[in-house]
Image: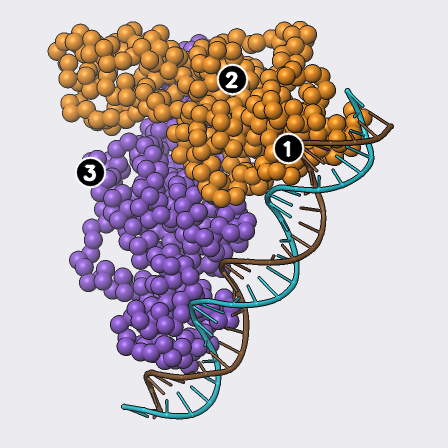
Chain colours: A orange, B purple, C brown, D cyan
Amino acid sequence: MELDERKKKILHAIILNYQETGEPVGSRTISKYSDLQLSSATIRNEMADLEEMGLIVQPHTSAGRIPTDKGYRLYVNHMLETAELEKEAEPERQVPQAADHVVERLDRMEQVLQQMIKVLAANTNYAALVSAPKYSRNKVKFIQLSRVEEQRLLAVVVVEGNIIKNTIFQVEESLTEENILSLNLMLNSSLNGLTIEEINLDIITKLKEQAGPHADVVGKVLDAVAQAIRADDEGLKIYTSGATNIFRYPELTDGSKAKDILEVFEEKEQLEELLTDKLNEEGKPGIQVYIGNEMPVQSMKDCSVVTATYSFGGGMEGTIGIVGPKRMDYQKAVDALQTVMGQLDSMFRKEE
Amino acid sequence: MELDERKKKILHAIILNYQETGEPVGSRTISKYSDLQLSSATIRNEMADLEEMGLIVQPHTSAGRIPTDKGYRLYVNHMLETAELEKEAEPERQVPQAADHVVERLDRMEQVLQQMIKVLAANTNYAALVSAPKYSRNKVKFIQLSRVEEQRLLAVVVVEGNIIKNTIFQVEESLTEENILSLNLMLNSSLNGLTIEEINLDIITKLKEQAGPHADVVGKVLDAVAQAIRADDEGLKIYTSGATNIFRYPELTDGSKAKDILEVFEEKEQLEELLTDKLNEEGKPGIQVYIGNEMPVQSMKDCSVVTATYSFGGGMEGTIGIVGPKRMDYQKAVDALQTVMGQLDSMFRKEE
DNA sequence: TATTAGCACTCTACCTAATCGAGTGCTAAC
DNA sequence: GTTAGCACTCGATTAGGTAGAGTGCTAATA
């Protein structure tokens, strides 16, 4: 059986109508509210074919049809392809090679992201989520050790993107000003320019060995610095907004579905899969869509998610996503995401 | 009508039974499962009295009784009073006057608090929430300005409790090392020892005036420092955990109640009222309970909240709370909170 | 006087049957 | 290839009927 143009139109009509109403859509509805002038009987025949192809189903005999995952997949793929084409027609958008110095106050970026998804959720009436960028591939720019109290030191590490890490720690012996100065020199000369992920145990032990006489103090300092650098870098931070929007969609709220979904939003762990899996997928960056059972998290099999990957160069990237019911307005979601991406771009360009 | 001992016992029995089952409790149940040997008929008479006093109600004729807010209030007050007495019987617990140096790595405290409420929620099967402590009354201990790039400076401010604030900012002119050194001296001598809330616009403008020749640079630096100090201090941070536990209680989930409650948890703003209102209340520190309509947030009128205020001295205090259905196990909630308070105490004492 | 057995009464929860209506598949006519 | 017509299916809604839990009241009892 082949999918001719007319069948596509009918499928599309079904998807759109189901999107609005949330109710199974019957042949008569299509017959009346679509531009193809066909009787309900004809639509019925076509629908039978579409069902045979696995693109739509009846929840029960004598009900209208709703799209299957496969049906949505077809529709979404088509949608993304046309978007792709239009994009290529446009002049290539300037992808700003966000150099380090462009990004001022990057430590506030997480707040910006939170604000973004708040707006995103409010505008779309779906749930939005974002993973904060990993900066483990950013390079150390500046390290400074200073004394706060007699036996208490403050270590401050600045990495590319002006992300500041710090810690206060205690040392047994009182260090002289010269000690601290030379430690500073040592730290900067040996760690400067390395990426965060390069500063692993190996490096640290190596440096400890080179320390010589003051090995124990140096060790302590190095541990503190390493720990400051690593602090809350492992464990992808994920923010969400508008999770309660799922209550707008009856198909997500009956039974214990709402509970299951909201639990996923509460335990951020599982959301991580949602946002990270995409990146590996066929090297294709940009917009990704998971529909129903394609979702990596089983308890969200009645949902779909649309994600986009943002990047500020220097390996700092993360993902923004929109979660809604399977019948969500994919076009709207994609558009909203693209708008947000544009805003992020201009925001971090403007602050130049 | 007076509330004799027997009536109290019956009320208590009703509360306990309703706590377990969530169903209205009838006279026969009380007659069988309480230590007072009375027939159901007698209980019925007593129940009629209790109803007249407004302590219990029938959801409808021919249903059992459930406690009213007033009934719970009576019970909780009694519970808290006896707890108070027992406490006084104990030797006064050492309230550690958490000196500054006791608290190591206080900047991680928020993570500790989050972990705490996670455990709290898991143990009680209620929702837990906590407000991060305000430290606006803490004093500035140490300020350091250093150069990161040619025209880019890093300001680090350490306040009591070893809380570290920082910011990176840009200056037009290149400063010499001596400039930076003298700025450091100036900042430390003028701001050191002041509390965060004392460093307001007045102080800043005053200092700017004293700056003399380099007024513009100094101004910029001062602004940056002030801004670093204030950063995200306004806007009480609130963390929650186990919000989805409300799905365990049918009376909170039918209709749109679940939605309403979860929305409050999502928009933290309203939770703020829950946690802050308590402090004013009759100067009585420690455990506070709000029941049903006593809740400051209308959409949570089917819930109760038990809160406790923690403090690390130096004006750093916040509130931990447990939110559950009105029929929650208040005793358990209070005990759990007290345990957590104890842990917090010992945790920040141990790290000495 | 306090307690209790007994009973009529009330109301919800649940089950059943009946009806309605939306939507289908199929057949036959166009 | 399209469409009108029709029998059929099945969920949703409604109405009626029953069971059971629990009450309030009265009268008997200790």
Three-letter code for the amino acid on which mark 3 is drawn: Lys
Q: Residues within 10 Å of mark 3 (few under 14, many from 20)?
A: few
Camera-side mark, 2 or 3: 2
Q: CA distance from mark 3 to mark 1?
A: 65 Å
Q: Label 3 belongs to which residue?
A: B350
Q: CA distance from mark 2 to mark 1?
A: 37 Å
Q: Label 2 belongs to which residue?
A: A310
Q: Label 1 belongs to which residue?
A: A65
Looking at the image, residue A142 sits to the left or right of residue A110; the answer is left
B210 above or below B26?
A: above
Residue A164: x, y in percent? 39, 20
Front-most of A111 and D7?
A: D7
Q: Residues within 10 Å of mark 2 (few under 14, many from 20)?
A: many
Q: Which quarter of the figure is the N terminus of chain B placed in?
A: bottom left
Three-letter code for the amino acid on which mark 2 is drawn: Tyr
Q: CA distance from mark 2 to mark 3?
A: 43 Å
